[in-house]
C-alpha cells in the first residue's frame, strides 16, 4: 500500500528520494534485467481479445540515478530506447530480445542530465520534473523530441544525438490552463502518426483541473494549443499516450484506492477524435491490478516487431523507492482486428490468422 501511495501522491517524501541531476555528465551505467514470464503473478494465461502478452523485465541498476522513468520513446524497430525521469535525467539504451521476440535485456545504457537552453544543469527540483516524452522527428539517436515538465510547466524541443539529449532549442506556447496547474500538469505527449492531424503534437493533463470532472487535452496547430477534453472513467489519472499509425491514440491510465490498491488501464481513442472543443472517450482495452505484474506505470511507447506486429511497451516509475517499488518493462502485441487493421504494415501471417 505504501508503494502505491507514493506512486499517486509523491509529495515531499518522494521528492527527497530523487537523486541530484546536476552536475551529471553523460556516463555508462549497468542495467540488470530479470525476466517476467507471465503477466499474472499466479501464472494464469493472459486472456484479452485486444492484446497478446509478449513478456516483461524487472529492471535494476547499481547507479543511484536509475529510476523515476516517466517518459519513453522507442525507435520504430523497438530496439533503440530513450527515457526521461522526473529527476531531470535521460537514459539511452538498446532493448534486446530473445529468439521468440520477448524482451531479454537492456544494453549499452547511458545516462545524463537534461539541461537549460544555455547548456547549464537543471538545479531546482521544480525545473527538472520531466513527465512525458515524444519523438518529433527522426529516431532516439538522431532526431528531435518534445519533453514536458510539470511544476514549472513547459514543453521543450530537444535535439537527440548519439551523445544523448542536447539543450532545448525552443519551448512551445503553453495553453492558458497551464496557469491553473499545480502538481498535476501535462503528463502525456504523443505526435499523431496518421489521420487528419498527422504530425500534430497532442498533450494530456494528468488529472482534471480543480472543480472539473474531465481531463484537459490540447492539440498544437500552427504552434498554437487548441483545447479538448477527455471523459474520465472511474477516477483514473492519465500517465502517458502513444499514437498508432492511423492517428488513433492509446492512453495509459492509473488509479489508487486504499481498499483496492493500484490499478492500471489502457484506453484506445479513435483517429480524428482530437478536434478543438470536442470531448473524447475511447474504449478500454486493458485493465489490471496488483494480481498482475504491474507497478506505477507511467511510460508508453509503440513500435514494430521484426514480423511487423504492433508492440506496446510500458515502463514504471519507481519513485527512486527501491524497497517498495520496481521498475518493470512490460510488452504486449496489439492483437485486435479492428484496431490492428487501422495500423500500417501488419504482417501477412498475422492477417491470415484473424
Image (cartoon, helix red, strand yellow):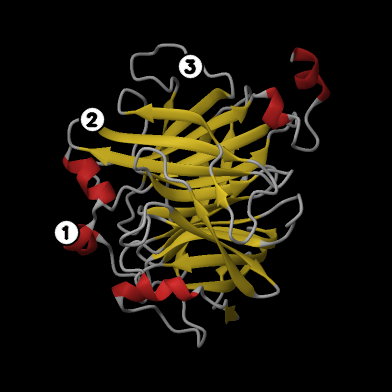
Relative horizontal placement of residue 241, taking residue 220 as reference (left or right): left
Q: Residue at x 79, y 38 (%)?
A: 344
Of callouts 3 and 1, which one flags the residue occurring earlier in the amino acid sequence? 1
Horizontal and vertical percent position of residue 108: 53, 51
Relative horizontal placement of residue 8, taking residue 282 as reference (left or right): left
Question: Callout 3: few (<14), some (14-19), or many (20+) C-alpha neighbours within 10 Å?
Answer: some
Of callouts 2 and 1, which one flags the residue occurring earlier in the amino acid sequence? 1
Above or below 212: residue 161 = below
Residue closer to the observer: 28 or 295:
295
Of all residues, the one furthest to the bottom in this rendering is 118
- Quadrant where the C terminus is found in the figure: top right
In this view, the mark in front (2 or 1) = 2
Q: Residue at x 29, y 69 (%)?
A: 20
Q: In which image quadrant can residue 64 be found?
A: bottom left
Q: Residue at x 74, y 56 (%)?
A: 198
Above or below 223: residue 194 = above
Question: Callout 2: few (<14), some (14-19), or many (20+) C-alpha neighbours within 10 Å?
Answer: few
Question: Callout 1: few (<14), some (14-19), or many (20+) C-alpha neighbours within 10 Å?
Answer: few
Horizontal and vertical percent position of residue 107: 53, 45
Of callouts 2 and 3, which one flags the residue occurring earlier in the amino acid sequence? 3
Q: Alpha-carbon distance for marks 3 and 1?
A: 36 Å
Which residue matches tag 3?
46
Which residue matches tag 2?
260
For residue 323, say whether it is visible.
no
In this view, the mark in front (2 or 3) = 2
What is the secondary structure assignment of the residue under circle 2?
A: loop
For residue 327, say whether it is visible.
yes
Q: Residue at x 59, y 24 (%)?
A: 50
Q: Alpha-carbon distance for marks 2 and 3?
A: 21 Å
Which residue matches tag 1?
13
Horizontal and vertical percent position of residue 13: 16, 59
Amino acid at each position: 500500500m505504501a508503494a502505491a501511495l507514493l506512486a499517486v501522491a509523491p509529495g515531499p517524501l518522494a521528492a527527497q528520494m530523487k537523486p541530484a541531476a546536476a552536475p551529471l555528465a553523460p556516463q555508462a551505467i549497468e542495467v540488470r534485467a530479470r525476466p517476467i514470464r507471465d503477466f499474472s503473478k499466479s501464472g494464469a494465461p493472459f486472456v484479452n481479445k485486444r492484446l497478446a502478452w509478449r513478456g516483461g523485465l524487472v529492471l535494476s541498476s547499481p547507479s543511484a540515478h536509475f529510476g523515476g522513468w516517466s517518459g519513453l520513446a522507442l525507435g520504430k524497430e523497438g530496439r533503440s530506447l530513450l527515457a526521461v525521469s522526473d529527476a531531470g535525467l535521460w537514459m539511452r539504451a538498446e532493448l534486446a530480445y530473445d529468439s521468440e521476440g520477448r524482451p531479454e535485456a537492456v544494453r549499452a545504457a547511458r545516462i545524463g542530465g537534461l539541461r537549460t537552453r544555455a547548456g547549464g544543469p537543471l538545479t531546482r527540483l521544480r525545473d527538472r520534473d520531466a513527465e512525458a516524452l515524444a519523438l518529433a522527428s527522426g529516431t532516439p539517436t538522431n532526431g528531435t523530441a518534445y519533453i514536458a515538465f510539470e511544476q514549472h510547466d513547459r514543453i521543450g524541443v530537444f535535439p537527440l544525438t548519439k551523445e544523448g539529449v542536447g539543450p532545448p532549442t525552443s519551448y512551445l506556447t503553453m495553453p492558458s490552463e497551464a496557469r491553473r496547474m499545480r502538481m498535476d500538469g501535462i503528463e502525456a505527449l504523443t505526435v499523431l502518426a496518421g489521420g487528419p492531424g498527422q504530425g500534430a503534437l497532442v498533450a494530456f493533463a494528468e488529472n482534471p483541473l480543480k472543480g472539473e470532472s474531465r481531463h484537459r487535452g490540447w492539440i498544437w496547430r500552427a504552434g498554437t494549443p487548441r483545447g479538448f477534453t477527455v471523459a474520465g472513467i472511474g477516477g483514473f489519472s492519465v500517465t502517458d499516450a502513444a499514437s498508432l499509425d492511423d492517428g488513433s491514440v492509446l492512453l495509459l491510465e492509473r488509479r489508487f484506492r486504499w481498499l483496492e490498491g493500484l490499478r492500471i488501464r489502457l484506453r484506445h481513442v479513435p483517429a480524428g477524435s482530437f478536434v478543438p472543443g470536442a470531448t473524447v472517450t475511447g474504449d478500454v482495452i486493458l485493465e489490471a491490478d496488483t494480481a498482475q505484474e504491474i507497478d506505477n506505470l507511467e511510460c508508453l511507447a509503440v513500435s514494430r516487431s521484426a514480423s511487423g506486429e504492433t508492440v506496446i511497451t510500458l515502463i514504471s516509475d519507481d519513485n527512486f523507492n527501491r524497497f517498495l517499488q520496481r521498475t518493470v518493462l512490460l510488452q504486449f502485441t496489439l492483437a485486435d482486428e479492428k484496431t490492428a487493421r487501422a495500423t500500417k504494415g501488419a504482417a501477412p501471417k498475422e492477417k491470415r490468422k484473424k
